[in-house]
Every structure is written in structure tokens, then in C-alpha cells.
Amino acid sequence: MNQYPTILCDTREGHPYSFGVLPLKKIKLETGDYSIEHFEDYVSLERKSLLDFVNTVINKDNRQRFFAELNRMKQYPRKVYCVIIEGSFEDIFEHRYESHAEPMSIFGFILSIMTDWGIPVIMAGNRQIGRLICETLLVNFWNHAQKGLKKD
């Protein structure tokens, strides 16, 4: 049994996290930006900078791609899935992003992901906290999975 999980990062992830001692492998993931090797159908984390998220809301093509991503998240037997936004609600309501998009539109879109899609959205506040949340979710899932594998 490995001491650490191998974190998978989608090849299309433009600004990937690094996870210190955790091995990182870049592959084309079907869904999300981060997962764990051998558990791709169970863990899917989507990372968005605040500006990227805002652009997803206002651009029809980006929004359609994002909806397809959310749809794929829901179709698998995933145990852990979420959208991690590197920003805060304060950033949104203080309009700390470069776009004419109204804060209430951004806020409403976040709420619709949670209520209409049933997918948690984590407002990480910044990139460093987003990375910590991503790493912690992945490692916690992996630890639980390892305990389950020992029982078999």
C-alpha cells in the first residue's frame, strides 16, 4: 500500500496546484481538475479562480462547457465532488473582479450550482486556501478508501 495518494491533475488545468510530498500526475481527466489515481470515478474536484468563474457565468460557451462538467460529476458514483472557487463572497459583493457581471448574478449562479445541481461550492477565499482544501479533501478520501480496502 502506498504511503501517499497519487494526485491526478487534468492536463487542461492552466495553473495547477502543487502538493509538496504528494506525487502529482498530469493526465486528461474526463471530469474535474483533480482526482486520485484509481479513484477517478469517486473523486472529482473542479478548481476555478474567481475571474475564471465569473467568465464561466457570463460567457455562453464557457457556461455550456461548465454545465456539461457538472452533469458528468453527477453521473458517476462519486463520493467527493465539489467546485472550489479561489475567492470569497466578499470579493463578489465588493466587485473585486474584472467584469461587468453583476455580483447578484454571480451569487445566484453559485446558489444554483448548489440547489439545482446538488454540487457543493466552496468559497476558498484565495488560491492558497483553495489548494489546502483540495489537498485535504483528496487525502481524507484516500485515507478512508485505504481503510475500506484493508477490510476486503
Image (cartoon, rainbow, N blue to C red):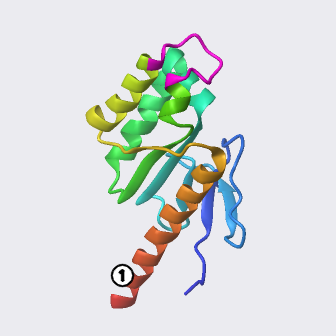
For label 1, the SS is helix
Q: Is residue 30 magenta?
A: no
Seen in the picture, residue 47 relative to 66 is either above or below; the reply is below
Q: Quadrant of residue 122 in the image? A: top left
Q: Residue placed at 33% from the left, 45% from the top?
A: 74
Residue 83 visible in image: yes
Pick the residue in front: 83 or 105: 105
Seen in the picture, residue 17 relative to 142 is either above or below; the reply is above
Residue 37: where, in percent of width, then height?
55, 66
Type of the residue with mark 1? Gly
The residues colored magenta run: 93-103
Pick the residue in front: 123 or 112: 123
Residue 152 visible in image: no
Q: State left or right for residue 48 relative to residue 145.
A: right
Q: Residue placed at 49% from the left, 13% from the top?
A: 102
Q: Residue placed at 33% from the left, 89% from the top?
A: 151
Q: Pointer 1: what residue? A: 148
Q: Quadrant of residue 62 in the image? A: top right
Task: Please state, as top left, top right, bottom left or bottom right, where the C terminus lies in the image.
Answer: bottom left
Q: Residue lying at the far top in this picture: please name it.
A: 100
